[in-house]
Amino acid sequence: MSLVIALCLFFLDGIFVAVLYARQDRMLAADLGRADCIMVLGCALRGDVPSPMLERRLGRGLELYRAGISTDIIVCGGQGDDENRTEAAAMAEYYINHGVPAEDVHREDASANTWENMENAKAIMAEKGFSNAVIVSSEFHLPRIQSFARQMELTAQYAGSKTQPHLRLYYTARECASFAKNLVWH
């Protein structure tokens, strides 16, 4: 009986992953219009510096900024136990070092997870008078972010950064578990 249940769960997980990637491709290919801000969600630091995955998110945000999608960027992320500073501080430094004026970079540095990233960034948006955003994260993360934005009534477009091919399966599986957890908690 346990084997049958395990096989059913494996099959359902496979369907979920197939749908997830089909939706991602549409979101990655979508033409983005102007937005009040670009919201870049945090990811791990390695000590003081952005991890490779965070660097890809930052690069995607910079690409959108330089394309004129918005003149304001909200960087999101608190400080993990193994990090020397907040993710938002490292992200802001990246953008300032790449020519974005400091006054155009807004920091959300109190969050510990994706929901808090977006909830706290939404408060910054309200404070600044922003009504919509392009949310940047890793491609595998976009369906859950879209779900959260809907729940928060946050008007958004989505832009994914590519994930290293050898890590894509791991992070997709992890995201499936997170997505399921969030269906229960949010």
Image: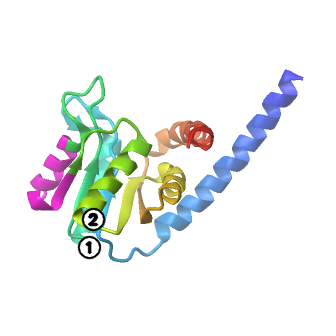
The x, y position of residue 77, in whole percent, is 30, 41
Image height of 14 relative to 27, above or below: above
The x, y position of residue 168, in whole percent, is 51, 43
Instruction: Decide whether residue 105 is among the magenta residues.
Output: yes
Instruction: Decide whether residue 96 is among the magenta residues.
Output: yes
Residue at point 54%, 63% (across, down): 25
Left or right for 43, reference 31:
left
Residue at the disc numbered 1: 67
Magenta segment: 89-106
Kind of residue sitting beneath label 1? Ala
Residue at point 61%, 53% (across, down): 20
Q: Which mark is residue 63?
A: 2
Left or right for 116, reference 80:
right
Image height of 71 relative to 143, above or below: below
Quadrant of the rendering where the N terminus is positioned = top right
Mark 1, other Cα within 10 Å: few <14 / some 14–19 / many ≥20 = few
Mark 2, other Cα within 10 Å: few <14 / some 14–19 / many ≥20 = few
Q: How many angstroms separate mark 2 from mark 1 (CA)?
A: 6 Å
